[in-house]
Amino acid sequence: MESIWLEYAWALVILICLEGLLSADNALVLAVIAKHLPENQKREAINYGIILAFFFRFFALFVISFIANIWQIQAVGAAYLLYLGLKHIIQARFGKKNEDIHKDDEKEAAGKGFWPTVGKIGLADLAFAVDSILAAVALALGLPDTALGNFGGMDAGKFIVVLLGGAAGLILIKFAATWFLQLLAKRPALETTAYAIVAWVGVKLAVITLAHEDIGVLDHDFPHSTAWTLTFYGVLIAIAMIGWFAPEKQSTPAESKEDKERKKA
């Protein structure tokens, strides 16, 4: 009996580490979505985001069999994260320059009030909840059954491990999101890197969708294979390193009316 609890304790440690990696992605989303808000509203929006993330993860625990069997839910989460990331990357790469970009940003920010921002955070949290719970349950299902009975559609011991791992991940999201906000304020160019990571997580959910037994484009066990896991985190680290070491672009200030008139004269 003691060996079972040691196995559960070890699984919990591994799950907390896994949730720590997954929470970094979620924290990045919270930071970049709340970035445009006034300083006094950023932390408040992130706090609401944490509450929503907890609700979605707790709810997902009770419907995990539904989430795992209905590939459309996974596909919607993948599509939203891909849209969120690629939209910003395309705009940053092919969008307008200089003063036009600043005007567009001001107009866009004006349409992003506090509650619309919280709603956008909630949608992102929902997509990440699917990813987080699927990964946690996949790990917990390898554990032996306990004598605690069933709860939430699975062994109660496994349920507790997944719940504790998810709670630890949310605590890490809270601190990581605050740190990312400070980092983005110092290095605005990292915002595009953050959205690239968000899009890559969308690819991860797309792979899970394509490996679903009802679709069968990829092997059912491929998303949990060592090769894909190493590939995913290798690319994730590469994106982060490229963004960190890439030189900051110096923005060219817009010319004032007086400067333009002086040049014409």
Image (spheres, rainbow, N blue to C red):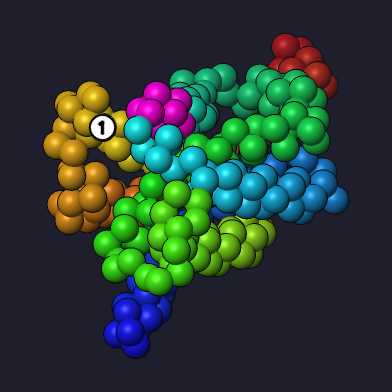
**Residue 191 seen in render:** no
User: Circle 1 sits on which residue?
Assistant: 212
Dot 1 falls on a residue whose secondary structure is loop
The residue positioned 32% from the left and 79% from the top of the image is 4
The residue positioned 33% from the left and 84% from the top of the image is 1
Magenta-tinted stretch:
70-77
Comparing 250 with 111, the one in front is 111
The residue positioned 31% from the left and 58% from the top of the image is 141
Comparing 25 with 188, the one in front is 25
Q: Percent x, y for residue 189?
A: 54, 44
- Look at the magenta stretch and give its main secondary structure: helix
Amino acid type, label 1:
His
Give yes or no for residue 150 being in the magenta stretch.
Answer: no
For this orientation, the residue located farthest to the bottom is 2
Q: Percent x, y for residue 79?
A: 43, 26
Q: Percent x, y for residue 152?
A: 50, 51
Q: Percent x, y for residue 117?
A: 72, 34
The residue positioned 59% from the left and 59% from the top of the image is 170
Comparing 113 with 73, the one in front is 73
